[in-house]
Image: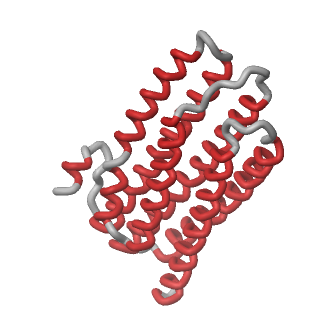
Amino acid sequence: MSHKHFGERLEDLRESLHRMSHDIEELLAEAVSIVGKADVADATGRVVEGDRAIDAIEVEIEETAIELFALHQPMASDLRVLVTILKINNDLERIGDHAVNIAEAAERLAALPKKVPIPPELQEMERIARQMLSDALDAFVHENAAEASAVRERDDTVDALQESLFRVMLTHMTEHNISGCLQVILIGRNLERVADLATNIGEDVIYMVRGTTVRHQAPTEASTS
């Protein structure tokens, strides 16, 4: 395979990943939008179907990337790009799974006779986690390590919100439906995992751009490495 042909296929792979990321962002947005609503069955079905489509795209991207590895045996920067695409591809597929978890929890909430309050921490977690994901993917497109580092710095904020959400829902359990409170906590946990995966993507982008691994380093340490 000529280097030109390899470059074209690699660019096609990047475009496929970018389209997949757009679909994931929309899937996550739809899943969170139905939390606390009364009639969510149709929306949950759309999220589940959307995740199945994401799964199929994930397999296609992985197979293409492995084929490029085998046929071209890329070196240096091209190798890092392919490795990063494989990692982000897997992380995006997992975010799709979390979107399904959120939609299904929202459906269980809707079926409860006694509703539970949705605390503002949940909306704030959703806003930050989705923005982290969007920014991490922009960093990949821009090949910008500084943008990726900025994503990592917001993960602690989401963790703190999840702890606050947990405490709030514990206090509501005595006066509201316990099962409903647990579903809200579960939704928060899934949003926390989305933020974690966005952080992973940011770390992979830093590796792609700089050739250095920053996972397990604090953001302040990574910014100087």
Q: Quadrant of residue 35?
A: top right
Q: Residue furthest top?
A: 174
Residue 39 seen from this side: yes
Give the image location of residue 145, x and y in percent. Answer: 31, 65
Identified at 34% across, 63% down, the residue is 147
Q: What quarter of the picture does the C terminus occupy?
A: bottom left
Q: Quadrant of residue 144?
A: bottom left
Direction from residue 109 to residue 90 in the image, left or right: left
Residue 207 seen from this side: no
Give the image location of residue 141, x and y in percent. Answer: 45, 72
Identified at 74% across, 29% down, the residue is 108
Identified at 35% across, 47% down, the residue is 154
Q: Nearer the viewer, residue 216 or 142?
A: 142
Direction from residue 38 to residue 29 in the image, left or right: left
Above or below, comparing residue 133 to residue 40 in the picture: below
Give the image location of residue 30, x and y in percent. Answer: 67, 51
Give the image location of residue 57, x and y in percent. Answer: 67, 62
Identified at 49% across, 60% down, the residue is 134
Q: Nearer the viewer, residue 220 or 128?
A: 128
Above or below, comparing residue 90 to residue 101 in the picture: below
Above or below, comparing residue 119 to residue 136 in the picture: above
Above or below, comparing residue 92 to residue 69 in the picture: above
Direction from residue 185 to residue 107 in the image, left or right: right
Q: Residue furthest left?
A: 224
